[in-house]
Structures are given as structure tokens and as C-alpha cells.
Amino acid sequence: MSERKYFGTDGIRGHVGTYPISADFILRLGRALGAVLARRRAADSRGVGAGPDRRDHGRKVTVVIGKDTRVSGYMFESALEAGLVASGANVRLLGPMPTPAVAFLTRSLRADAGIVISASHNPHQDNGIKFFSAMGEKLDDELEAEIEAEIEADFVTVASDALGKASRIDDAVTRYAEFCKSTVADEFTLNGLRVVLDCAHGATYQVAPKVFRELGAEVSAIGVEPDGLNINRGVGSTDPDALAKAVVERGADLGIAFDGDGDRVRIVDRDGTVTDGDDMLYVIARHWKRRGSLPGPVVGTLMSNYGLQRALKQMDIPFIRANVGDRYVLQQLKEHGGVLGGETSGHVLCLDRFTTGDGIVAALALLEALADDNESFADARAGLVKLPQTMLNVRVEGAKAALGSDSVKRVLEEVEAVLEGRGRVVLRASGTEPLVRVTIEAADAAEVERLAARLADAVKSAAQATA
């Protein structure tokens, strides 16, 4: 993706109250989106562009807004609503809903775009804005660039009789729950399954227990008491220890952890073993391959464990690595005709079911595979043998500059030479936080930790030298 002033790999994200995650900027952002969409519709109606929107000439632009449970969501929801209405767009408010639910409802409600107010797995002090197109997909680079340019333009409010209106969708949870259940076979049931759900005090706290109970599971839940400040705190897919403990204590068959906005998921086995997205991809791919419903390659990322690549190869399943970020996984799946991909962090895309990563849908796909094969999760993933992997997050300002320094390049070359033919090293700047991520895989766990620490020290020194 080309350089952006505001957009990162997953929308716009930062610390609440610090520009651009401030009420004044978000107000301008809402107006900019509405103005760009209206301009594109007008051009399309004149025949400048092509597409189905031409038949919508004369209808107001409509934008769906959902959010997670962090307290700043109230402020940014109001700012977006005001900016959009000022541009002449109608707004449909969903309240707290998972990110993939906003993607689904954007399509279902025939809206022109969807907005999610969320910083995903980050703490409540952070927030962000993510966008979906009318098709429920991430925005393309061209549209993001057009929105950024419009933000810098004068804030123009349309005439009073052209202002948009706002309304609330009261049955959003029910609509999305029905969609989730529709992604599995009609005869599929979770009867007899004892499951603990960890909703991270986030956006899935209402809908996830509803879906799994209605499919027949015996559900107990943690992380379902959001107070605006506790999202992702000690719970959720990025901190699954509480879920692992609950699964063992309650004698559950399985634990399922979502992140704050519900697009990530991780599974905890009955003995408390915490797994990741690689395990899910392996089990689902294995099942779909057996039943002949796995077109194209499985797509992982630079962070996917080499053991996954090796295990898929043994089943004659092609594997492609994309850049980190579910938008890049999606791009590779589309380009190569695949339907299954994801990230180690728990973003899993099942494109035979939906257009974006969805924690609930991915968990149901996994449970459907286990039920069809009459296997436990532990037995199903036994063929996946991972290499030891260490990932260190080095918090630095100017991450890209540090990575470009000669000293870091030299140490990276030395580490790659040590691992050549028997391991991998990935050194990259985070797209959403001021971090450099150092990841190393090899058979010798002690060597992995030593080499990762060496690279991390080199990054810290380079950052200090350029500060």
C-alpha cells in the first residue's frame, strides 16, 4: 500500500485525544467520507464510472456505523454522525457490534459504506476507525487516498434541506446472529458441547453467547461485562490465560476467545492448551481438502509458522504467504482463487461464507469440521508440528527508520546466515503501533531466543541513535 498520512494497514488508529484520534478530526473524517461517496455517485450517474450504483441515482448516500465497547466510542460515534449528516448522508447506527457484523449489515442494509469505531485488541486508551465498502470489504487504496485529500478541504455543510438523517437499527444483534448461524449446515448442532466463551468485554459480548446457545451448546461466558474501560483487560484472544483456567475449572470441552472487536478468535483445548490461527487453518484446511471443497491455496502471512506450511505440503495443499494484515491475505486469496486464509493472531477468513475475517464464523467453521470428522480438536491438529517461534515487540519511535539503519541490516544479515536452510527470521514495523516486531523460527528454541534478543537489541540501539 502506498504511503498514507492517516490510514494504516487497518484504518486509522491511535491514542484517544491525540490527533488524529480526536473529536475534531473524526468530525472532518465523517464529512469527507460522505462527500467522496456523494461525488462518486454523482459521477457514476453521469456515466463517468460503471457499476450497479447507477440505478441508485437520486438516493442519498447511506453509511452504517458500529462500535466496540470502549467509552470513547460514544464521542466518535457522535462526531462521525455529525460529519456524515453535514455532507448529506444518512446514518444507520448499530451500537456495539463486532467488526464483521458491520461488514455484513453494510451489505444487508444496502448501504454505501460501513464504519467501525474500534482499536481491536488494544486497551481502552486507544481507538480507531475502520471502513467497509458497500460489498462488505476493506476500502481500496484509491478510495482511502481520496478520503484523505477531502479531509484537507474546507468543511462544507450542505443546504438544510439536503442534510442527512440518523436512525438506529434496533435488531442488529438478531440480524447478525441469524447470519452467523446460516454459515453452517442446517443439520449442524452443538448439542452436548460444553464451551466457555471469552468476549474480551468487547463487541461480541451480546451476540456470541446468543449464537452458540441457539445452536445447542452449553455456554458459560467470561469477559461479558463491559464498562467502557475494561475491554481486552486480562481477557480475550490476546490474553487467553483466564479462558484457559476457566475451561479446566469448568470441565468444558473447548474455550473460544474473541478480541475486542470480534474479528480475531483463538481456541483453548479442554486441557487448557492455548492454540492460534495456524491451528485453525490446519484443521479447517484438512477437512475441506478431504471433502473436496478447498479451491486454490491456503494463504497465511509472513508470521505463519513454518510447521503449517510443511504440514499443508504433506497434504498437497498449496500455501502462500502474504504481508501481515488481513487485507493482504484477502488480496492473495482473490488473486489465486482461494477461500481459506488467515493470520497466526486469529484473523481467519472463510471466503466461502463471508467477505472478511469473522471470529464467530471462523469458530463455527472449525466446530463444523470437528463434528463432520467426529474428532476432538487435539486429535484433529495432531499432524501440525510447529517450529519453536519467538516474537519480541520492541517499542520504538521511528520504527521504519530504525529498520533502515546499516547496523540493523548488518545484524539481520548475520542472523539470516546462521538460520539459512533451517529457520526463518521476520523483522517488520507494526502498521498500527510504534513497534518493531522481531520473529524467529528454528528447531533449537534456545538459539531462537538468543538470536531474537540480539536483533531486538540492534533495533533499540538504532532507534536511540536516530532519536
Image: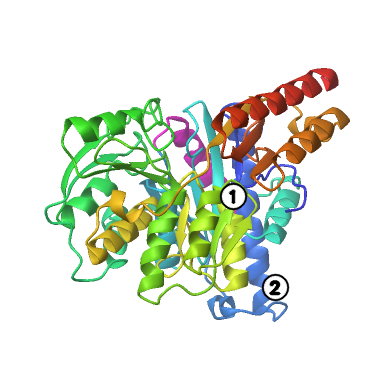
Main SS, magenta region, reads helix
In magenta stretch: residue 154: no
Q: Nearer the viewer, residue 60 or 303?
A: 303
Q: Is residue 264 left or right of residue 154?
A: left
Q: Which residues are magenta?
A: 69-87
CA neighbours of label 1 inside 10 A, class few (<14), some (14 to 19), many (20+):
some
Identify the amino acid type marked 1. Answer: Gly
Sequence order check: which comes first, mark 1 or mark 2?
2
Of residues 29 and 98, the one nearer the viewer is: 98
**Badge number at residue 325:** 1
Q: Residue at x 72, y 56 (%)?
A: 146
Tag 2 secondary structure:
helix
Q: Is residue 329 left or right of residue 348?
A: right
Residue sitting farthest toward the right: 406
Residue 33 point in image, percent of width and height: 62, 54
Q: Residue 89 falls in which quadrant of the image?
A: bottom right
